[in-house]
Protein backbone atom coordinates (compact mmCIF):
# COMPACT_ATOMS: atom_id res chain seq x y z
CA UNK A 1 0.00 0.00 0.00
CA UNK A 2 1.17 3.54 -0.76
CA UNK A 3 -0.10 5.33 2.36
CA UNK A 4 2.22 5.35 5.36
CA UNK A 5 0.75 3.72 8.45
CA UNK A 6 0.50 6.13 11.42
CA UNK A 7 3.36 5.70 13.89
CA UNK A 8 1.03 5.63 16.92
CA UNK A 9 -0.91 2.81 15.25
CA UNK A 10 2.15 0.70 14.43
CA UNK A 11 3.58 1.13 17.93
CA UNK A 12 0.34 -0.08 19.48
CA UNK A 13 0.14 -3.03 17.09
CA UNK A 14 3.72 -4.02 17.98
CA UNK A 15 2.72 -4.08 21.62
CA UNK A 16 -0.43 -6.13 20.93
CA UNK A 17 1.12 -8.69 18.57
CA UNK A 18 4.72 -8.85 19.80
CA UNK A 19 6.43 -11.71 17.92
CA UNK A 20 3.65 -11.79 15.30
CA UNK A 21 3.98 -8.12 14.37
CA UNK A 22 6.33 -8.56 11.40
CA UNK A 23 4.04 -11.21 9.93
CA UNK A 24 1.11 -8.81 10.40
CA UNK A 25 3.03 -5.90 8.83
CA UNK A 26 3.87 -8.00 5.77
CA UNK A 27 0.15 -8.28 4.92
CA UNK A 28 0.17 -4.63 3.86
CA UNK A 29 2.29 -5.67 0.88
CA UNK A 30 -0.37 -8.14 -0.23
CA UNK A 31 -3.44 -7.63 -2.41
CA UNK A 32 -6.70 -7.68 -0.41
CA UNK A 33 -8.95 -10.68 -0.94
CA UNK A 34 -12.21 -10.36 -2.84
CA UNK A 35 -15.37 -12.35 -2.33
CA UNK A 36 -19.00 -12.87 -3.24
CA UNK A 37 -21.86 -14.21 -1.14
CA UNK A 38 -24.66 -16.22 -2.75
CA UNK A 39 -28.14 -14.71 -2.44
CA UNK A 40 -30.15 -17.76 -1.43
CA UNK A 41 -33.39 -15.81 -1.75
CA UNK A 42 -32.93 -16.33 -5.48
CA UNK A 43 -30.52 -19.19 -6.08
CA UNK A 44 -29.00 -22.08 -4.15
CA UNK A 45 -25.27 -22.33 -3.54
CA UNK A 46 -25.08 -25.42 -5.74
CA UNK A 47 -26.94 -23.71 -8.58
CA UNK A 48 -24.58 -20.72 -8.50
CA UNK A 49 -21.54 -22.99 -8.49
CA UNK A 50 -22.96 -24.72 -11.56
CA UNK A 51 -23.72 -21.41 -13.31
CA UNK A 52 -20.75 -19.35 -12.14
CA UNK A 53 -18.39 -18.01 -14.81
CA UNK A 54 -15.79 -17.37 -12.06
CA UNK A 55 -13.37 -19.61 -10.23
CA UNK A 56 -14.67 -19.75 -6.65
CA UNK A 57 -13.13 -21.05 -3.42
CA UNK A 58 -15.16 -21.43 -0.20
CA UNK A 59 -14.78 -18.99 2.69
CA UNK A 60 -14.50 -21.15 5.84
CA UNK A 61 -16.70 -19.04 8.14
CA UNK A 62 -19.58 -18.46 5.69
CA UNK A 63 -21.25 -21.40 3.90
CA UNK A 64 -22.64 -19.08 1.20
CA UNK A 65 -19.41 -17.09 0.76
CA UNK A 66 -16.66 -17.63 -1.81
CA UNK A 67 -13.31 -16.07 -2.62
CA UNK A 68 -12.91 -14.70 -6.14
CA UNK A 69 -9.61 -14.68 -7.99
CA UNK A 70 -7.63 -11.48 -8.23
CA UNK A 71 -8.73 -9.53 -11.30
CA UNK A 72 -12.23 -11.06 -11.38
CA UNK A 73 -14.95 -8.46 -11.93
CA UNK A 74 -18.19 -10.02 -10.67
CA UNK A 75 -19.96 -6.64 -10.85
CA UNK A 76 -19.63 -6.77 -14.64
CA UNK A 77 -21.70 -9.89 -15.15
CA UNK A 78 -25.48 -10.07 -15.71
CA UNK A 79 -25.81 -12.29 -12.64
CA UNK A 80 -24.84 -9.37 -10.44
CA UNK A 81 -27.70 -7.33 -11.94
CA UNK A 82 -30.06 -10.24 -11.32
CA UNK A 83 -29.10 -10.10 -7.63
CA UNK A 84 -27.67 -13.62 -7.51
CA UNK A 85 -24.75 -12.62 -5.31
CA UNK A 86 -23.45 -9.76 -3.21
CA UNK A 87 -19.86 -8.57 -3.61
CA UNK A 88 -18.49 -8.48 -0.07
CA UNK A 89 -15.16 -8.44 1.75
CA UNK A 90 -14.72 -12.01 3.11
CA UNK A 91 -14.21 -11.12 6.80
CA UNK A 92 -17.37 -8.99 6.74
CA UNK A 93 -19.46 -12.14 6.20
CA UNK A 94 -18.61 -13.58 9.63
CA UNK A 95 -20.74 -11.51 12.00
CA UNK A 96 -24.13 -12.47 10.52
CA UNK A 97 -23.16 -16.13 10.76
CA UNK A 98 -22.63 -15.63 14.51
CA UNK A 99 -26.07 -13.98 14.81
CA UNK A 100 -27.68 -17.36 14.00
CA UNK A 101 -30.80 -15.88 12.37
CA UNK A 102 -33.75 -18.26 11.96
CA UNK A 103 -36.79 -17.89 9.66
CA UNK A 104 -39.50 -15.99 11.54
CA UNK A 105 -37.13 -13.95 13.70
CA UNK A 106 -37.55 -10.21 14.19
CA UNK A 107 -34.13 -8.76 13.37
CA UNK A 108 -32.68 -5.26 13.62
CA UNK A 109 -29.55 -4.30 11.65
CA UNK A 110 -28.77 -1.11 13.49
CA UNK A 111 -25.89 0.33 11.40
CA UNK A 112 -26.79 -1.27 8.10
CA UNK A 113 -25.57 0.76 5.10
CA UNK A 114 -24.67 -0.13 2.42
CA UNK A 115 -26.61 -3.31 3.07
CA UNK A 116 -24.30 -6.30 2.73
CA UNK A 117 -25.09 -7.71 6.15
CA UNK A 118 -28.80 -6.87 5.78
CA UNK A 119 -29.03 -8.88 2.56
CA UNK A 120 -27.25 -11.74 4.35
CA UNK A 121 -29.79 -11.57 7.21
CA UNK A 122 -32.69 -11.43 4.75
CA UNK A 123 -31.47 -14.58 3.01
CA UNK A 124 -31.45 -16.39 6.35
CA UNK A 125 -34.99 -15.20 7.14
CA UNK A 126 -36.19 -16.68 3.81
CA UNK A 127 -39.07 -14.21 3.58
CA UNK A 128 -40.40 -14.98 7.08
CA UNK A 129 -40.34 -12.67 10.09
CA UNK A 130 -39.12 -9.10 9.92
CA UNK A 131 -35.93 -7.21 9.11
CA UNK A 132 -35.51 -3.56 10.01
CA UNK A 133 -32.36 -2.07 8.48
CA UNK A 134 -31.32 1.30 9.83
CA UNK A 135 -28.61 3.83 9.19
CA UNK A 136 -28.13 7.21 10.82
CA UNK A 137 -26.79 8.89 7.65
CA UNK A 138 -29.51 9.84 5.13
CA UNK A 139 -27.26 9.59 2.06
CA UNK A 140 -26.13 6.08 2.97
CA UNK A 141 -29.71 4.81 3.20
CA UNK A 142 -30.08 5.20 -0.58
CA UNK A 143 -27.56 2.43 -1.26
CA UNK A 144 -29.04 0.39 1.58
CA UNK A 145 -32.55 0.53 0.12
CA UNK A 146 -31.33 -0.22 -3.41
CA UNK A 147 -29.37 -3.28 -2.33
CA UNK A 148 -32.33 -4.71 -0.44
CA UNK A 149 -34.48 -4.16 -3.53
CA UNK A 150 -31.93 -5.68 -5.92
CA UNK A 151 -31.62 -8.81 -3.79
CA UNK A 152 -35.36 -9.41 -3.65
CA UNK A 153 -36.11 -8.71 0.02
CA UNK A 154 -39.87 -8.73 0.66
CA UNK A 155 -39.98 -8.43 4.47
CA UNK A 156 -37.62 -5.50 5.04
CA UNK A 157 -38.07 -1.94 6.31
CA UNK A 158 -35.44 0.80 5.97
CA UNK A 159 -35.15 3.50 8.64
CA UNK A 160 -33.00 6.62 9.01
CA UNK A 161 -33.10 6.95 12.78
CA UNK A 162 -31.00 7.16 15.92
CA UNK A 163 -30.64 3.95 17.94
CA UNK A 164 -32.29 5.68 20.89
CA UNK A 165 -35.48 6.46 18.94
CA UNK A 166 -35.68 2.92 17.57
CA UNK A 167 -35.34 1.50 21.08
CA UNK A 168 -38.10 3.83 22.26
CA UNK A 169 -40.41 2.76 19.41
CA UNK A 170 -39.62 -0.97 19.69
CA UNK A 171 -38.76 -1.73 23.33
CA UNK A 172 -38.02 -5.38 24.05
CA UNK A 173 -39.10 -6.36 20.53
CA UNK A 174 -36.25 -7.83 18.46
CA UNK A 175 -35.05 -11.42 18.73
CA UNK A 176 -31.67 -10.58 17.23
CA UNK A 177 -29.80 -7.33 16.75
CA UNK A 178 -26.67 -6.76 14.68
CA UNK A 179 -24.45 -3.80 15.54
CA UNK A 180 -21.82 -3.43 12.85
CA UNK A 181 -20.58 -0.43 14.75
CA UNK A 182 -19.06 2.73 13.28
CA UNK A 183 -15.37 2.51 14.08
CA UNK A 184 -11.89 3.81 13.30
CA UNK A 185 -11.57 1.28 10.47
CA UNK A 186 -8.05 0.12 11.24
CA UNK A 187 -8.81 -3.36 9.93
CA UNK A 188 -9.47 -1.89 6.48
CA UNK A 189 -6.23 0.13 6.16
CA UNK A 190 -4.88 -2.33 3.58
CA UNK A 191 -8.01 -1.99 1.46
CA UNK A 192 -8.87 1.71 1.89
CA UNK A 193 -6.05 4.25 2.08
CA UNK A 194 -8.50 7.05 2.85
CA UNK A 195 -9.12 5.45 6.25
CA UNK A 196 -5.40 5.66 6.94
CA UNK A 197 -5.38 9.37 6.10
CA UNK A 198 -8.39 10.08 8.31
CA UNK A 199 -7.03 8.20 11.33
CA UNK A 200 -5.71 10.16 14.31
CA UNK A 201 -4.49 8.97 17.73
CA UNK A 202 -7.79 10.10 19.32
CA UNK A 203 -10.02 8.43 16.71
CA UNK A 204 -10.53 5.11 18.58
CA UNK A 205 -11.61 6.87 21.76
CA UNK A 206 -14.11 9.01 19.85
CA UNK A 207 -15.72 5.95 18.30
CA UNK A 208 -15.68 3.97 21.54
CA UNK A 209 -17.94 6.55 23.20
CA UNK A 210 -20.36 6.33 20.27
CA UNK A 211 -20.34 2.53 20.28
CA UNK A 212 -21.23 2.29 23.95
CA UNK A 213 -24.29 4.48 23.45
CA UNK A 214 -25.40 2.23 20.57
CA UNK A 215 -24.98 -0.89 22.71
CA UNK A 216 -27.15 0.58 25.46
CA UNK A 217 -29.95 1.35 23.00
CA UNK A 218 -29.72 -2.12 21.47
CA UNK A 219 -30.16 -3.68 24.92
CA UNK A 220 -33.45 -1.81 25.32
CA UNK A 221 -34.75 -3.00 21.95
CA UNK A 222 -33.86 -6.67 22.50
CA UNK A 223 -36.45 -9.19 23.68
CA UNK A 224 -35.63 -11.22 26.82
CA UNK A 225 -33.46 -14.16 25.81
CA UNK A 226 -32.42 -12.45 22.57
CA UNK A 227 -28.98 -12.10 21.01
CA UNK A 228 -26.83 -9.10 20.04
CA UNK A 229 -23.81 -9.47 17.79
CA UNK A 230 -21.39 -6.56 17.97
CA UNK A 231 -18.74 -6.21 15.28
CA UNK A 232 -16.14 -3.72 14.11
CA UNK A 233 -13.46 -3.60 11.43
CA UNK A 234 -10.81 -2.18 13.76
CA UNK A 235 -7.98 -3.54 15.91
CA UNK A 236 -8.29 -0.92 18.68
CA UNK A 237 -8.97 -2.66 22.04
CA UNK A 238 -10.91 0.30 23.41
CA UNK A 239 -13.41 -0.05 20.54
CA UNK A 240 -13.61 -3.83 20.84
CA UNK A 241 -13.02 -5.61 24.14
CA UNK A 242 -13.23 -2.29 26.00
CA UNK A 243 -16.71 -1.44 24.70
CA UNK A 244 -18.02 -4.95 25.40
CA UNK A 245 -16.56 -5.23 28.90
CA UNK A 246 -18.04 -1.87 29.89
CA UNK A 247 -21.44 -2.96 28.51
CA UNK A 248 -21.36 -6.28 30.40
CA UNK A 249 -20.43 -4.53 33.64
CA UNK A 250 -23.52 -2.33 33.45
CA UNK A 251 -25.87 -4.99 32.01
CA UNK A 252 -25.64 -8.07 34.26
CA UNK A 253 -28.46 -9.81 32.38
CA UNK A 254 -26.10 -10.26 29.41
CA UNK A 255 -23.24 -12.69 28.98
CA UNK A 256 -20.61 -13.02 26.27
CA UNK A 257 -21.10 -16.31 24.40
CA UNK A 258 -17.99 -18.15 23.16
CA UNK A 259 -17.83 -17.68 19.40
CA UNK A 260 -16.26 -21.05 18.63
CA UNK A 261 -15.98 -20.62 14.90
CA UNK A 262 -14.13 -22.61 12.29
CA UNK A 263 -10.57 -22.38 13.55
CA UNK A 264 -10.23 -19.09 11.65
CA UNK A 265 -11.28 -17.04 14.67
CA UNK A 266 -8.67 -15.98 17.21
CA UNK A 267 -9.87 -15.29 20.77
CA UNK A 268 -10.52 -11.79 22.05
CA UNK A 269 -7.83 -10.08 24.07
CA UNK A 270 -7.44 -9.94 27.84
CA UNK A 271 -10.58 -10.52 29.87
CA UNK A 272 -12.78 -11.29 26.84
CA UNK A 273 -11.50 -14.52 25.23
CA UNK A 274 -15.12 -15.38 24.29
CA UNK A 275 -14.97 -12.73 21.55
CA UNK A 276 -13.44 -13.35 18.14
CA UNK A 277 -10.78 -11.57 16.15
CA UNK A 278 -9.90 -12.05 12.50
CA UNK A 279 -6.26 -11.10 11.94
CA UNK A 280 -5.13 -10.55 8.32
CA UNK A 281 -1.91 -12.51 8.90
CA UNK A 282 -3.94 -15.53 10.03
CA UNK A 283 -6.92 -15.53 7.64
CA UNK A 284 -7.65 -14.60 4.04
CA UNK A 285 -9.50 -11.40 4.87
CA UNK A 286 -9.27 -8.02 6.55
CA UNK A 287 -9.20 -7.31 10.28
CA UNK A 288 -12.45 -7.76 12.23
CA UNK A 289 -13.70 -8.11 15.80
CA UNK A 290 -16.94 -9.82 16.90
CA UNK A 291 -18.71 -10.50 20.18
CA UNK A 292 -21.94 -12.43 20.78
CA UNK A 293 -24.02 -11.12 23.69
CA UNK A 294 -26.99 -13.10 24.98
CA UNK A 295 -29.74 -11.92 27.28
CA UNK A 296 -30.51 -14.29 30.15
CA UNK A 297 -34.27 -14.25 29.51
CA UNK A 298 -35.29 -12.25 32.56
CA UNK A 299 -38.38 -10.15 31.89
CA UNK A 300 -36.89 -6.83 32.95
CA UNK A 301 -35.64 -4.79 30.01
CA UNK A 302 -32.61 -2.60 30.67
CA UNK A 303 -33.79 0.91 31.45
CA UNK A 304 -37.47 1.88 31.64
CA UNK A 305 -38.46 1.35 28.02
CA UNK A 306 -41.39 -0.88 28.87
CA UNK A 307 -42.18 -3.79 26.56
CA UNK A 308 -43.25 -4.39 23.02
CA UNK A 309 -46.76 -5.51 23.95
CA UNK A 310 -47.71 -2.05 25.18
CA UNK A 311 -45.75 -0.10 22.59
CA UNK A 312 -46.89 -1.77 19.36
CA UNK A 313 -50.21 -2.68 17.73
CA UNK A 314 -51.70 -6.08 18.50
CA UNK A 315 -51.04 -7.32 14.96
CA UNK A 316 -47.29 -6.96 15.53
CA UNK A 317 -47.04 -9.06 18.70
CA UNK A 318 -46.91 -12.49 17.13
CA UNK A 319 -44.12 -13.50 14.77
CA UNK A 320 -45.00 -13.73 11.14
CA UNK A 321 -48.28 -11.85 11.39
CA UNK A 322 -49.64 -11.34 7.89
CA UNK A 323 -52.96 -9.66 8.64
CA UNK A 324 -53.55 -7.24 5.75
CA UNK A 325 -54.24 -3.70 6.80
CA UNK A 326 -54.46 -0.69 4.53
CA UNK A 327 -52.47 2.26 5.85
CA UNK A 328 -50.95 5.49 4.75
CA UNK A 329 -47.47 6.71 5.60
CA UNK A 330 -47.07 10.46 5.68
CA UNK A 331 -44.13 11.91 3.80
CA UNK A 332 -42.73 12.93 0.44
CA UNK A 333 -42.33 11.07 -2.82
CA UNK A 334 -42.01 7.35 -3.04
CA UNK A 335 -39.91 5.34 -5.49
CA UNK A 336 -41.35 5.94 -8.91
CA UNK A 337 -40.81 2.31 -9.83
CA UNK A 338 -38.38 3.25 -12.58
CA UNK A 339 -35.26 3.76 -10.54
CA UNK A 340 -36.13 7.31 -9.47
CA UNK A 341 -35.08 8.82 -6.18
CA UNK A 342 -36.92 7.30 -3.24
CA UNK A 343 -38.78 9.53 -0.85
CA UNK A 344 -39.23 8.80 2.80
CA UNK A 345 -41.95 8.78 5.37
CA UNK A 346 -41.16 10.82 8.40
CA UNK A 347 -42.94 12.35 11.30
CA UNK A 348 -42.43 13.82 14.72
CA UNK A 349 -44.79 12.62 17.40
CA UNK A 350 -47.05 11.25 14.69
CA UNK A 351 -47.67 14.67 13.15
CA UNK A 352 -48.46 14.42 9.45
CA UNK A 353 -46.03 15.96 7.01
CA UNK A 354 -45.92 16.11 3.23
CA UNK A 355 -48.71 15.50 0.79
CA UNK A 356 -51.82 13.40 0.97
CA UNK A 357 -52.43 10.73 -1.68
CA UNK A 358 -53.25 12.49 -4.92
CA UNK A 359 -55.49 11.72 -7.83
CA UNK A 360 -56.91 8.27 -7.42
CA UNK A 361 -57.33 8.10 -3.65
CA UNK A 362 -56.32 5.20 -1.47
CA UNK A 363 -59.29 2.95 -2.18
CA UNK A 364 -58.97 3.36 -5.93
CA UNK A 365 -55.20 2.78 -5.74
CA UNK A 366 -55.66 -0.45 -3.82
CA UNK A 367 -58.35 -1.54 -6.27
CA UNK A 368 -55.99 -0.89 -9.21
CA UNK A 369 -53.27 -2.88 -7.44
CA UNK A 370 -55.69 -5.74 -6.84
CA UNK A 371 -56.63 -5.78 -10.52
CA UNK A 372 -52.94 -5.87 -11.52
CA UNK A 373 -52.31 -8.79 -9.18
CA UNK A 374 -55.22 -10.75 -10.65
CA UNK A 375 -54.30 -10.09 -14.27
CA UNK A 376 -50.50 -10.13 -14.16
CA UNK A 377 -49.59 -12.34 -11.18
CA UNK A 378 -52.61 -14.51 -10.48
CA UNK A 379 -52.16 -13.99 -6.71
CA UNK A 380 -51.67 -11.17 -4.22
CA UNK A 381 -48.79 -10.81 -1.71
CA UNK A 382 -49.60 -10.95 1.99
CA UNK A 383 -48.84 -8.02 4.25
CA UNK A 384 -49.96 -4.52 5.19
CA UNK A 385 -50.62 -2.23 2.20
CA UNK A 386 -49.02 1.14 2.96
CA UNK A 387 -49.79 4.11 0.71
CA UNK A 388 -47.02 6.68 0.40
CA UNK A 389 -48.32 9.42 -1.87
CA UNK A 390 -49.48 7.49 -4.94
CA UNK A 391 -46.93 4.76 -4.22
CA UNK A 392 -47.72 1.42 -2.64
CA UNK A 393 -45.62 -0.74 -0.34
CA UNK A 394 -46.44 -4.09 1.22
CA UNK A 395 -45.10 -3.89 4.74
CA UNK A 396 -44.45 -6.55 7.37
CA UNK A 397 -45.70 -4.03 9.95
CA UNK A 398 -48.82 -1.87 10.10
CA UNK A 399 -48.31 1.86 9.62
CA UNK A 400 -48.85 2.67 13.31
CA UNK A 401 -45.67 0.81 14.27
CA UNK A 402 -43.64 3.32 12.23
CA UNK A 403 -45.40 6.50 13.34
CA UNK A 404 -42.93 9.23 14.20
CA UNK A 405 -39.95 7.40 12.69
CA UNK A 406 -37.99 8.57 9.64
CA UNK A 407 -38.85 5.78 7.25
CA UNK A 408 -37.04 5.43 3.93
CA UNK A 409 -38.87 2.27 2.85
CA UNK A 410 -41.87 1.05 4.89
CA UNK A 411 -41.76 -2.32 3.15
CA UNK A 412 -41.59 -4.03 -0.24
CA UNK A 413 -42.14 -1.40 -2.93
CA UNK A 414 -44.64 -2.83 -5.41
CA UNK A 415 -45.51 0.15 -7.62
CA UNK A 416 -47.53 3.32 -8.11
CA UNK A 417 -50.83 4.43 -9.56
CA UNK A 418 -50.96 6.68 -12.61
CA UNK A 419 -54.20 7.76 -14.30
CA UNK A 420 -56.08 5.06 -12.44
CA UNK A 421 -53.74 2.27 -13.56
CA UNK A 422 -51.24 0.40 -11.43
CA UNK A 423 -47.64 0.52 -12.68
CA UNK A 424 -45.48 -2.21 -11.13
CA UNK A 425 -42.20 -1.15 -9.52
CA UNK A 426 -38.83 -2.65 -10.27
CA UNK A 427 -38.43 -4.02 -6.69
CA UNK A 428 -41.62 -6.03 -7.19
CA UNK A 429 -40.00 -7.79 -10.16
CA UNK A 430 -36.64 -8.47 -8.51
CA UNK A 431 -38.32 -10.28 -5.60
CA UNK A 432 -40.58 -12.50 -7.74
CA UNK A 433 -39.99 -16.00 -9.07
CA UNK A 434 -41.01 -16.85 -12.67
CA UNK A 435 -43.74 -19.20 -11.40
CA UNK A 436 -45.32 -16.28 -9.52
CA UNK A 437 -46.13 -14.36 -12.74
CA UNK A 438 -48.59 -14.99 -15.52
CA UNK A 439 -45.89 -14.22 -18.11
CA UNK A 440 -42.14 -14.67 -17.91
CA UNK A 441 -39.21 -14.73 -20.29
CA UNK A 442 -35.69 -16.04 -19.76
CA UNK A 443 -32.85 -14.28 -21.55
CA UNK A 444 -29.44 -15.87 -21.94
CA UNK A 445 -26.42 -14.41 -20.18
CA UNK A 446 -24.17 -15.97 -22.80
CA UNK A 447 -25.29 -14.44 -26.11
CA UNK A 448 -25.61 -10.72 -25.30
CA UNK A 449 -29.41 -10.46 -25.10
CA UNK A 450 -29.38 -10.18 -21.30
CA UNK A 451 -26.92 -7.29 -21.49
CA UNK A 452 -29.08 -5.64 -24.16
CA UNK A 453 -32.05 -5.82 -21.80
CA UNK A 454 -29.97 -4.44 -18.90
CA UNK A 455 -28.96 -1.51 -21.14
CA UNK A 456 -32.64 -0.64 -21.63
CA UNK A 457 -32.93 -1.77 -25.26
CA UNK A 458 -36.11 -2.97 -26.96
CA UNK A 459 -35.87 -6.61 -28.06
CA UNK A 460 -37.61 -8.64 -30.76
CA UNK A 461 -38.98 -11.72 -28.99
CA UNK A 462 -41.22 -14.27 -30.72
CA UNK A 463 -44.32 -15.31 -28.82
CA UNK A 464 -43.19 -18.93 -28.47
CA UNK A 465 -40.32 -17.85 -26.21
CA UNK A 466 -42.71 -16.53 -23.56
CA UNK A 467 -43.80 -18.73 -20.69
CA UNK A 468 -47.51 -18.00 -20.23
CA UNK A 469 -49.75 -19.51 -17.57
CA UNK A 470 -52.88 -21.31 -18.77
CA UNK A 471 -55.78 -18.89 -19.04
CA UNK A 472 -53.53 -15.85 -19.58
CA UNK A 473 -52.80 -14.03 -22.81
CA UNK A 474 -49.30 -13.24 -24.10
CA UNK A 475 -49.78 -9.49 -24.24
CA UNK A 476 -48.90 -7.60 -21.06
CA UNK A 477 -46.25 -7.28 -18.38
CA UNK A 478 -43.55 -9.93 -18.54
CA UNK A 479 -41.15 -10.86 -15.76
CA UNK A 480 -37.80 -10.80 -17.53
CA UNK A 481 -35.27 -13.29 -16.17
CA UNK A 482 -31.60 -13.92 -16.83
CA UNK A 483 -30.96 -17.66 -17.18
CA UNK A 484 -34.20 -18.15 -15.25
CA UNK A 485 -33.58 -15.60 -12.45
CA UNK A 486 -35.72 -12.47 -12.20
CA UNK A 487 -34.19 -9.15 -13.28
CA UNK A 488 -37.03 -6.73 -14.13
CA UNK A 489 -40.16 -5.92 -16.11
CA UNK A 490 -40.96 -5.55 -19.79
CA UNK A 491 -44.15 -5.34 -21.85
CA UNK A 492 -44.68 -7.79 -24.69
CA UNK A 493 -46.89 -7.06 -27.69
CA UNK A 494 -46.84 -8.46 -31.24
CA UNK A 495 -43.29 -9.79 -31.09
CA UNK A 496 -41.70 -6.76 -29.43
CA UNK A 497 -40.48 -6.55 -25.85
CA UNK A 498 -40.77 -2.99 -24.60
CA UNK A 499 -38.10 -2.50 -21.96
CA UNK A 500 -39.16 -1.38 -18.47
CA UNK A 501 -35.73 -1.68 -16.83
CA UNK A 502 -35.13 1.47 -14.71
CA UNK A 503 -32.79 4.06 -16.18
CA UNK A 504 -30.93 4.47 -12.89
CA UNK A 505 -30.12 0.75 -12.71
CA UNK A 506 -28.95 0.18 -16.29
CA UNK A 507 -25.75 -1.53 -17.41
CA UNK A 508 -23.01 1.00 -18.10
Image (tube, rainbow, N blue to C red):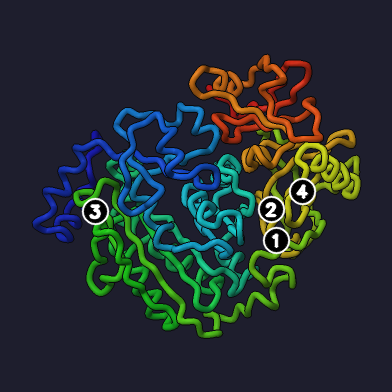
Residue 58, percent across and down? 32, 45
Residue 295 higher or lower than 392, as above or below: below
Residue 138: mark: none
Judged from the image, the secondary structure of the residue bearing numbered disc 2 is loop
Circle 2 Cα neighbour tier, 10 Å, few/some/many (<14 / 14–19 / ≥20):
many
Residue 444 higher or lower than 24, as above or below: above
Between disc 4 and disc 2, the foreground one is 4
Q: Are marks 1 and 4 in contact (CB under 8 Å)?
A: no
Among the two numbered marks 3 and 4 on one chain, the one whose residue lies closer to the N terminus: 3
Residue 279: mark: 3
Residue with the most extreme left position: 19
Q: Are marks 2 and 1 in contact (CB under 8 Å)?
A: yes
CA distance for labels 3 and 4 = 48 Å
Residue 410: mark: 2
Which image quarter holds the N terminus?
top left
Between disc 3 and disc 1, the foreground one is 1
Q: Residue at x 55, y 21 (%)?
A: 451
Residue 113 in sight in this render: no
Q: Residue at x 89, y 33 (%)?
A: 419
**Residue placed under numbered mark 4 in the picture:** 380
Amino acid sequence: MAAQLPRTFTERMRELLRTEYEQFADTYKETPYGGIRVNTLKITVQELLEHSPFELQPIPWCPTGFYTEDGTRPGKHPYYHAGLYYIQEPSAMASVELLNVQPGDRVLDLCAAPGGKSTQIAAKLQGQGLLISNDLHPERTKALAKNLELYGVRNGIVLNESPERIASAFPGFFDRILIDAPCSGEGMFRKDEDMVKQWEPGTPRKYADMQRDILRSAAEALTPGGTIVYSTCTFAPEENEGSILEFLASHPQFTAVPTGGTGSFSPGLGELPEAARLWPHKVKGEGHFMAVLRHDGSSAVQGDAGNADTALPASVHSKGSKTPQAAKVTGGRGDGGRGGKGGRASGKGGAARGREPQGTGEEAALAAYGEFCRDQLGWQPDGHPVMFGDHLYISPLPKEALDGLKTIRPGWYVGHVRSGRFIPGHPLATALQPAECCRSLSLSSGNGEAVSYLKGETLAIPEQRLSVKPGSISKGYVLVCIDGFSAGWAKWQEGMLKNEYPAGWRWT
